[in-house]
Amino acid sequence: MKRTIVCFGDSNTWGYDAKTDQRFIDEIRWTGLLQSELYNTYRVIEEGLPGRTSVSDDPLFEGLAGISYLYPCLMSHAPLDLVVIMLGTNDTKERFALTSYNIAQGIVRLAHKSRGSGAGPAGKAPEVLVLVIH
């Protein structure tokens, strides 16, 4: 039976190509590379959105706070074996005035919400992996 991984992130997960202002093809995105390495034993679901923050509502763009979308996202793809969270880059925007500690707190909230979602096999907690880019 295939296992399922949801990759929840921002433009890095979406596959944004800054050179063309478009999206990389599936085979070049990190999620596509992950899928090819795992062959047919896993299904990798790409849930990236450019501009997504961990918990902050952006006053300029609607619907980008990951915390409000996370639960419905996970439940729509359940059962999940693993949730990979790769967020935080957009939280560094000056308009949010967050410290690195505040950003980390937001990521921890996402991880706890993922574990408490019941989106894992048999309604249990999925495993969570947080990726940090620096």
Image (cartoon, grey):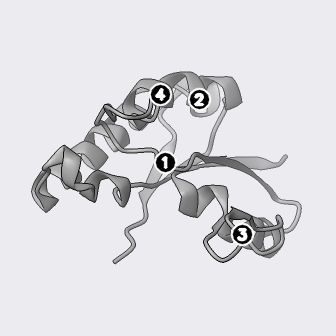
- Three-letter amino acid code at disc 2? Cys
| Label annotation for residue 127 | 1
On the image, the x and y values in percent for residue 13 come to 59, 59
Q: Residues within 10 Å of mark 4 (few under 14, many from 20)?
A: some
- Asked where in the image residue 73 lies, by quadrant, the reply is top right
Q: Marks 2 and 1, Cα distance to the nearest angstrom?
A: 15 Å
- Three-letter amino acid code at disc 1? Glu
| Label annotation for residue 73 | 2
Please say if 78 is above or below 110: above
Q: Residue at x 34, y 35 (%)?
A: 58
Label 1 vs 3, first from the N-terminus: 3
| Label annotation for residue 29 | 3
Q: Secondary structure at mark 1?
A: strand
Q: Residues within 10 Å of mark 1 (few under 14, many from 20)?
A: some
Q: Marks 2 and 3, Cα distance to the nearest angstrom?
A: 20 Å
Q: Residues within 10 Å of mark 2 (few under 14, many from 20)?
A: some
- Three-letter amino acid code at disc 4? Gly
Q: Marks 2 and 4, Cα distance to the nearest angstrom?
A: 13 Å
Label 4 vs 1, first from the N-terminus: 4
Q: Are marks 2 and 1 in contact (CB under 8 Å)?
A: no
Q: Secondary structure at mark 2?
A: helix
- Three-letter amino acid code at disc 3? Arg
Q: Nearer the viewer, residue 95 or 24?
A: 95
Of the 4 image quadrants, the one containing the C terminus is: bottom left
User: How many labels sit on residues?
Assistant: 4
- In the picture of the structure, the residue carrying the numbered disc 4 is 63
